[in-house]
Image (cartoon, grey):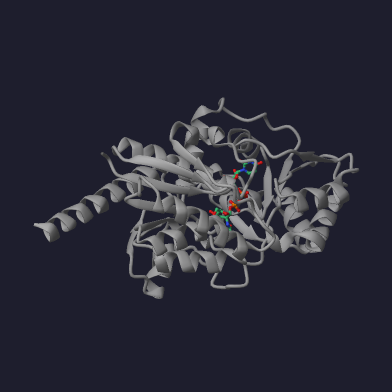
Amino acid sequence: MSPVIMLVVGTRPEAIKLAPVARALQAQGLLPHIVLTGQHSQLDPSAYGLAAHRFTRLQCPATGDPRVHAEAVANAIASLLRGAGRPGLLIVQGDTSSALGGALAATAAGVPLAHVEAGLRSHDLALPWPEEGNRVAIDRLSQLLFAATSDNAANLSAEGVTGEVHVTGNTAIDALFDVVSSLPPGSDGPGLPRLLVTCHRRENWGAAFTPIGLALIDLARFAWLRIEIVLHSNPAMAAAARLLLGGNPRIRLLQPMDHRAMVGAMRSAHILLSDSGGIQEEAPALGIPLLVLRSTTERPEGIATGNTLLVGNERGEIVHHVRRLLEDERAYRAMAVPAFPFGDGKAAPRIAALCRQWLTRQQTAEQALIA
Ligand SMILES: CC(=O)N[C@@H]1[C@@H](OP(=O)(O)OP(=O)(O)OC[C@H]2O[C@@H](n3ccc(=O)[nH]c3=O)[C@H](O)[C@@H]2O)O[C@H](CO)[C@@H](O)[C@@H]1O
């Protein structure tokens, strides 16, 4: 019987980034077992190709305190691991409380742990919170660490992690390429310049969203600028956006969309304004300038290639940087050259091959012990 590989999925980005890994593991003759934690309760596995695999749904919806949620996920997965079909490897992705819960459960059960998107660091435990602390802890516990970039691997080496580190690229680019190859050619044409916005990070919740919203209202005075904000499944963020922007005829509020529609929307945008981690990886590959609504990032590679720029969440700064890109053709073009610092779209097959090799080595070592 081929080894079972358990993959923990709690949120939309984890589904997007682990679906290519599940497919690649299957191609290696391994058996993916998707564990849906319920952190994003509306997550539909079939929307990401995950329903093709064996999957188990846990009832661990996100809670106000991510530490409480991580513990709930850890307990739920621990009981799974005590049951039949103990996996040869448990894989988590990124930095959510679902990922941390999976890592804690695997470690407690003595199940080997692999981390996809290992080594991302803002080097500030308070920002983003709790993600920076989650990913440091997960990396400390992992036997296999799949770093997207050499910068990420250097972070791991500096921390003296004990697991095996491999630079593989980020599977976000695998997923992006899959989607782009399925989209009709070209975008919806030049049209009016489109500013596409997403905003969901904890540090931009509540009152912190106000300056961002006011900046969009300021920018909406340019009648020739089409502004669209894609709402997030997080009810707090959607409510804040509706309250501040809902009545503005020049700002369209869009419902969360599936990944294919989102990539299509990003590809036809003139400028992206977002606090998203995944969009920081996708924008350079799409060649769409991205202004990041954060004061720090664990993805400095996109800044180094000139595709992304940190603008924070101050009203004046946001307006200034959007206007600069709209009015300064040279500045715009400098940010609009496609670049691939986060990978070549082949990260998932690399990760799957490395998992296969690691399992084979483990089996050989165990047999040698018995012999
Ligand atoms: C601190 C931090 O940065 N943490 C990140 C956070 O993920 P995130 O910030 O990337 O989260 P989002 O922005 O929600 O997702 C983005 C993806 O969703 C697609 N999208 C967007 C809107 C929509 O309507 N439909 C869509 O399909 C979009 O194209 C993109 O691919 O947690 C992940 C898991 O641990 C981490 O990996 C990741 O570091």
Which residue occupies the foreground of this view, 328 or 189?
189
Q: Position of residue 23 (x, y in %)?
A: 40, 37
Which residue occupies the foreground of this view, 251 or 185?
251
Q: Could one spot residue 337 in this view of the protein? A: no
Q: Could one spot residue 296 in this view of the protein? A: yes
Query: Along the horizontal axis of the image, is 328 left or right of 114?
Result: right
Total tally of numbered discs in the picture: 0
Which residue occupies the foreground of this view, 58 or 202?
58
Residue drawn at point x = 56 percent, y = 26 percent: 185
Q: Position of residue 170 (x, y in %)?
A: 45, 50
Looking at the image, residue 174 lies above or below residue 304: above
Residue drawn at point x = 91 percent, y = 43 percent: 247
Q: Quadrant of the N terminus?
A: top left
Q: Quadrant of the C terminus?
A: bottom left
Query: Along the horizontal axis of the image, is 224 left or right of 134?
Result: right
Residue drawn at point x = 76 percent, y = 62 percent: 317
Residue drawn at point x = 69 percent, y = 58 percent: 293
Q: Position of residue 161 (x, y in %)?
A: 37, 70
Q: Position of residue 238 (x, y in %)?
A: 77, 48
